[in-house]
Amino acid sequence: MSRKVTDKAVVNRPARHVKTIIIGSGFAGLGLAIRLTEQGRRDYLVLERGGDVGGTWRDNTYPGAACDVPSQLYSYSFALNPNWSRSFSRQGEIQRYIQAVSQRYGVRDRHIFDCDVTSARWNNDRSVWEIESTQGSFTADTVVCAVGALCEPALPDIKGISEFEGEVFHSARWNHDADLTGKRVAVIGTGASAIQIVPAIAPEVDHLDIYQRTAPWLLPRYDRPYTTAERLAFQYVPGFQRMYRAGVYAARETQVLGLAKFPGLMRLFEMIAKGKLRHEIRDRELRAKVTPNFRIGCKRMLISNDYYPTLTRPHVDVVTDPIAEVRKNSIRTEDGTEREIDALIVATGFHVTDSPTYDTIVGRDGRTLSEVFDDSGQQGYKGSSIANFPNMFFLLGPNVGLGHSSMVYMIESQINYIADALATVDRMKLRTVEVRRDVQDAYNKDLQAKLAGSVWLTGGCSSWYLDKHGNNTTLWPDFTFEFRRMTKIFDVAAYDTSTFRADQEAVAP
Ligand code: NAP
């Protein structure tokens, strides 16, 4: 179980040196911890700010929370789960899976939970990372930042919101003590979280206002419980589950053609989505309100069978007039209408390209990751390293996100790369390893050239995929097997390296 250090114990304690520190224990950090353990390396620690593993699946406990990637693909390849109860797993089941995997692979004792990293600073003289946390100070030869992109809730900057007197909380910080039964509730946002929350809470509330800034595209959700026969087959028929998984993977991968290469193909998805909309919303006025005005795929495509039907219920309203202000117990829109509410749910997404975490990481030249990203945009190399940040690797760094398939696949590709990087550093007795600026620049030029024709840049929307320079710095613009191929082996030639002098220890002080 977790090794918890009390606050008292850390007072005045000297920094503890660890060879590798992994920050964050979602699918990414946990997966790397398992790989290192499997390789016989126990010289690492995972610092996790929460009280358990799971990351986004631990934090997002809102009603209706579920995955929009099929269960068979949304798991580690080395720990398939024959017991998924349905084709699209719900949050609780995924969280239990992650917990079970962390137990099975015996990595929980390498975790320090409730350990919030407040800063990570590169010390050039000693070639170590100096880390401050709520559980004391650490130094590390190498840090792997696995905090994920969807971990810092973005609260909307709406006039008066802090004056609201009722319950108010973000979708990713659901207040389970707040009873919404019989209440007048407002939801701000119509993204992936909101479209799951709305149908889940609608039956219990007295009235529901949904504040929509941009109408999302919705596709059918082919969700159903697995039959007993299927579950038995997953468990006992050799190769069946792998074949099933490969089929799901291949079907998903075809979407890359439309999303990244030939956006015109996305019209096919648009036809399906429009048919669904016509079928599920008969009222022309409401249908017009929720019809998107951009090419499907430009923002994340959402899947739901109960969102549109919920919008047609008599006690549910979609409000498209922009919000002017939040008052003590109401929301006023710019057209002057004031709607009274008892509770406010902000489903407004996350700080993705402007994560506060970036302010806490200080690189070789004394600049924070935020400052580096401010100058050059959120650029990295293979999503796994960033120039100016020696001996630091990233899981889910720039341009590894997906709009169509399982992030666990991308994470496992990166784990291959980073585990090989750590092994290379040991084998070559490297003191420092830092991606070359020219290599990173060329890599990003190529990425942006590929992205230029993608639906994310040509589809006529603004989204959290884009940074403030207008570049898509979050998504991978190609087939995922291409990413797997390019991350198979750590390409040390792409890195500036230094070795230990003869009189220096290969382990930092
Ligand atoms: P999101 O996709 O960023 O959606 C945020 C919503 O809030 C959008 O509708 C946005 O409108 C709106 N919004 C933001 N600021 C606003 C403001 N100031 N005033 C009014 N509206 C505002 O966030 P999310 O729904 O939490 O989802 C984030 C990501 O999490 C998803 O894209 C997905 O990758 C992941 N996710 C996945 C699942 C899953 O099933 N696997 C479930 C939930 C979330 P605009 O569109 O106009 O910006």
Image (cartoon, rainbow, N blue to C red):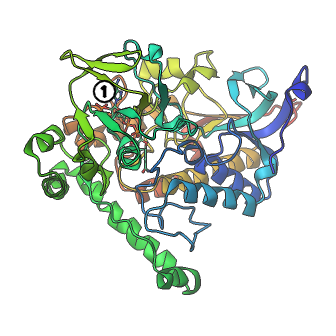
Horizontally, residue 294 falls left or right of residue 244, namely left
Q: Closer to the camera, 89 or 45?
A: 89
Q: Closer to the camera, 265 or 446?
A: 265
Q: Position of residue 77 (x, y in %)?
A: 56, 65
Q: Closer to the camera, 91 or 421?
A: 91
Horizontally, residue 57 falls left or right of residue 301, namely right
Residue identified by numbered label 1: 470
Give the answer, above or below, for where 344 lies relative to 267.
above
Q: Decide if residue 495 is in sight here.
A: yes
Residue at 60 percent of width and 46 percent of height: 58
Give the answer, above or below, for where 402 lies relative to 87.
above
Residue at 47 percent of width and 64 percent of height: 71
Q: Residues within 10 Å of mark 1 (few under 14, many from 20)?
A: few
Which image quarter holds the C terminus? top right
Q: Decide if residue 490 is in sight here.
A: no
Report the amino acid beneath label 1.
Gly
Which image quarter has ligand 1? top left
Q: Closer to the camera, 245 or 348?
A: 348
Residue at 66 percent of width and 50 percent of height: 30
Is disc 1 placed on a helix, strand or loop? loop
Q: Position of residue 163 (x, y in %)?
A: 46, 13
Horizontally, residue 452 falls left or right of residue 423, namely left
